[in-house]
Image (cartoon, rainbow, N blue to C red):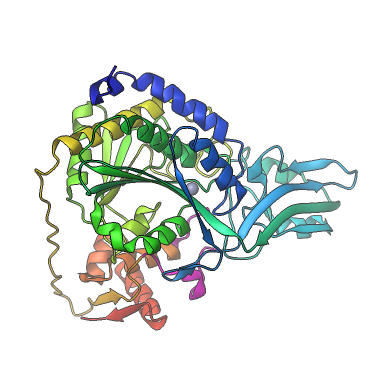
Amino acid sequence: MESNFQNIIAQIPEIGEDMHELMIELFPICRSITGNGLRKTLKILKNHIPLEIFEVPTKTKAFDWEVPREWNITDAYIKNSKGEKIVDFKKSNLHVLNYSIPINKKISLDELKLHLHSLPEYSDVIPYRTSYYNENWGFCITHNQLLQLEEDEYEVFIDTTLEDGSLTYGEYFIKGESEDEVLLSCYLCHPSMCNDNLSGIVLLTLLAKHLKKLSLQYSYRFLFIPETIGSIVWLSRNEMNVAKIKHGLVATCVGDSGISTYKKSRQGNTEIDQTVIEVLKKSGDDYKIMNFDPLGSDERQFCSPGFNLPVGSLRKTNPANFPEYHTSADNTEFVKAKYLADSFSKYFKVILKLEENFGKFYSKNNEELPEIDNKNDQVFLNLNPKCEPKLDKTVLYRKIGGAVHNDALTILWVLNYSDGKHSLRDISLRSGIDFKQIKQTAELLQDKKLLKRIL
Ligand code: ZN
């Protein structure tokens, strides 16, 4: 039978099962922002869609960033003095601080504790922590286990390599009638966790697999990239073509039991924003709409002021708002086939609507120049508007990734909205961050030559 949108919609419950099955297959792989975990993941996706795989060498420049050394891991454990493995990477890859340098030595409990991460508020789960750009080693364990550790001599062993290699990503392009593109992006750098981020990977894989059977007006570009550095690298290599992107969505956290949440594009009123909102309204389900903020996933780069692409993000529970986020509890039980199917259905209906409206809709971005009605208010220009600058080069920022830092949050707000069109007071109102803190941050960023005052 010839495929059309309606008969794919009829298959959505089974597609949910297919997504869940693929998620289970991908779950055990230890992924990171570079390395063999990414290659292995992409190889499995190639069984479903003919992805093109790119390898970008270490030290390749991408705006303010460069591709880091490639990280690979074979084993890691902590043994007590009796030779018993009390923490074992082979049981959960979350046990190792992602991007740990190699280590092999015997240490006291006090020294060991300096390298242990746990979550006192959720004492029976393993947290996920990273240290991509700051050489460090560490283990992540449950808080209960941490409390039970006794004075002893511990053997710590992490068998990793950090060498010149490459950053790997996958891209799949479906050519439609038009050169106008819809960008669908997900990240694949997290180790064994499901909602964040395997759910996005399996959703986009199955979406691509089914879309390629249809005759389409738009062309569709699917990205499977490591988060942050991957979108920055991709944008730096594809800058000439981004004008073709007419609509886009970042798929993250699409498999939990929560209601659908749509985070608008930075422009806020583009066709993709209106289309997603219309689909959610018509679904009859509860949903939530959020304004853009410069936090979260790769929409931070796609919507950095130098690109400002019409890219939103449709997810279920907002990342960090579910307690399982960035822990071992975000597993194959937490994400269910029916929730994945629900997200698939909404993404698919958004695409159907975009196809129906092809050529009918002309959106205009009419942000007005700010009015400054207060002598304390100021307007700055981001001197590094394409993607985020690499902040750890200039200011103390995110030494251990995976947790939330308030100062970093203010910096991201000020940088993203310092486009000459938003004053510091506007940024304070949008972000809910105190004006004084916004102003101090702008002054700090001006000292670091990241901003220039224009009003
Ligand atoms: Zn994450």
| Residue 11 sits above or below residue 106 on the image | above
Q: Quadrant of residue 301?
A: bottom left
User: Residue 137, can we see it?
Assistant: no
> Which residues make up the magenta segment?
387-406
Residue 108: give x, y in percent of width and height. 83, 57
Q: Nearer the viewer, residue 92 or 66?
A: 66
| Residue 398 sits above or below residue 122 on the image | below
| Residue 148 sits above or below residue 25 on the image | below
Q: Nearer the viewer, residue 228 or 121?
A: 228
Identity of the residue furthest to the top in this view: 1
Judged by its main secondary structure, the magenta piece is loop
Q: Quadrant of residue 370?
A: bottom left
Residue 211: give x, y in percent of width and height. 31, 33
Q: Residue at x 30, y 35 (%)?
A: 347
Q: Please state if 139 lies on the left or on the right of 395 as rendered.
A: right
Q: Residue at x 53, y 36 (%)?
A: 44
Image quarter hosting the C terminus? bottom left
Q: Residue at x 42, y 44 (%)?
A: 319
